[in-house]
Amino acid sequence: MRAAVVTSFDSPPRYGEYPDPVAHGKDEVVVEVLAAGLHPRVRSQADGSHYTSTDELPLVPGVDAVVRDPEGRIRYTVMDDTTLGTMAERTVIDLNRSVVLPHGIDPALLAAAMNPVMSSWVALRRRVDPPRKQRVLVLGATGNAGRMAIQVAKRFGAAHVIAAGRDEVLLAELPALGADRTCRFDQLAGACDVDVVIDYVWGEPSARAMVDMLTARRDRGAPITWIQIGSVAGPTAPIPSAALRSARLNIVGSGIGSVPGRDFIKELPKLASAIAGGAFDVRVRTLPLADVEQAWTDAATTRDRIVLVP
């Protein structure tokens, strides 16, 4: 079969031949891939930088997809750690890690939205109590996942959502998605009195923001939960010890491992239903799987979520 194949962590995948998939386990089936999203998580899988990487090559990237099973049902699936991902004509899925989708759903729409929406949806459902009547700050709000996090927080009852980012042009678009206020990173001291922070940035910018915000809080004894999800600014953050001692700060992560796989799967039906029902503003651009090298280049600059279609 044809697939996107990674043979070196130093170069993008290339379109080529790959052995046909074979199902082995009792709940495994070979499926036809209809659409697979090119998410930041996929890029880190393909360059070997993700914390789940085993350094095994060659591999087919792709951590989720919309697929057609042998009975003709359309499913959304998330993959276990494997060298056979979803950016191929066919792949092997575990039926227990998939959900049947509503009839008539647009595969590209689901493939574009499920991963970025899932990041904040699962965080606010499984790592903290849903933010009903709370104030939420989204760091990195101009990216795909950040834009979705604004909408997810509002859907879960947040009273006030602040969207923080660097690009003022993109920030100006966010009130239409539900942001009650926007700010740059150098203005975060004025956004200090929040209850929950959804952080897609990490690194030095998040460390500075954390210190500025905690210092400026009117009541340092009021709890604030910082949910670390993404790390576009760096994998480590130099957080001073005083930040942890001087305020009632709780730092948690949300991702594979900190959230059990079964909990991710339990959220899929409601999440898919919400996306299919038009609950989220989704920007999607489809490209043929054969153009995977071009897609890899475009993904670094486009504001759309690229979806590859075999």
Image (tube, rainbow, N blue to C red):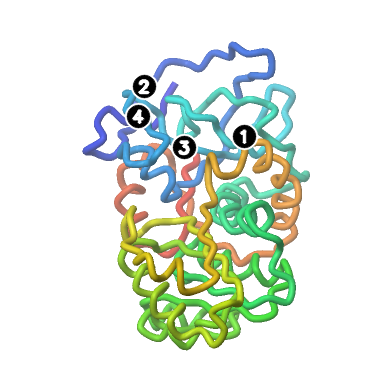
Find numbered disc 2 in the image and state the secondary structure of the residue it sits on.
strand
Question: Which residue carries the number 3 mark?
Answer: 62
Which label sits in the foreground, 2 or 3?
3
The amino acid pointed to by label 1 is: Val
Helix, strand or loop at label 4? It is strand
Separation (CA) of disc 1 from disc 2: 20 Å
**Between 40 and 125, which is closer to the camera in this rendering?**
125
Tell me which label, 2 or 3, sits earlier in the chain. Answer: 2
User: Please, is residue 287 above or below residue 234 in the view?
Assistant: above
Of badges 4 and 3, the one in the foreground is 3
Cα–Cα gap, marks 4 and 3: 10 Å
Dot 2 alpha-carbon crowd within 10 angstroms: few under 14, some 14 to 19, many 20 or more = few
**Looking at the image, which residue is at 53% across and 47% down?**
255
Q: In the displayed structure, would residue 107 be above or below residue 82?
A: below
What is the distance, in whole Å, between disc 3 and disc 1 at their CAs?
Answer: 12 Å
Decide which of 136, 223 is in the foreground and name it. Answer: 223
Mark 3: amino acid: Gly
Q: Earlier in the sequence, mark 3 or mark 1?
A: 3
Q: Earlier in the sequence, mark 4 or mark 3?
A: 4
Q: Marks 4/2: CA distance?
A: 8 Å
Label 4 crowd (10 A; few <14 / some 14-19 / many >=20)? many
Q: CB under 8 Å between callouts 4 and 2?
A: no
Q: Which residue is mark 2?
A: 17
Q: Badge 4 is on which residue? A: 5
Residue ID for mark 1 = 67
* Three-letter residue code for mark 4: Val
Q: Quadrant of the N terminus?
A: top left
Residue at the outermost left position? 10
Question: Between marks 2 and 3, how big is the CA–CA gap?
Answer: 16 Å
190 to 269, vertically: above or below = below
Marks 3 & 1, CB-CB < 8 Å contact: no
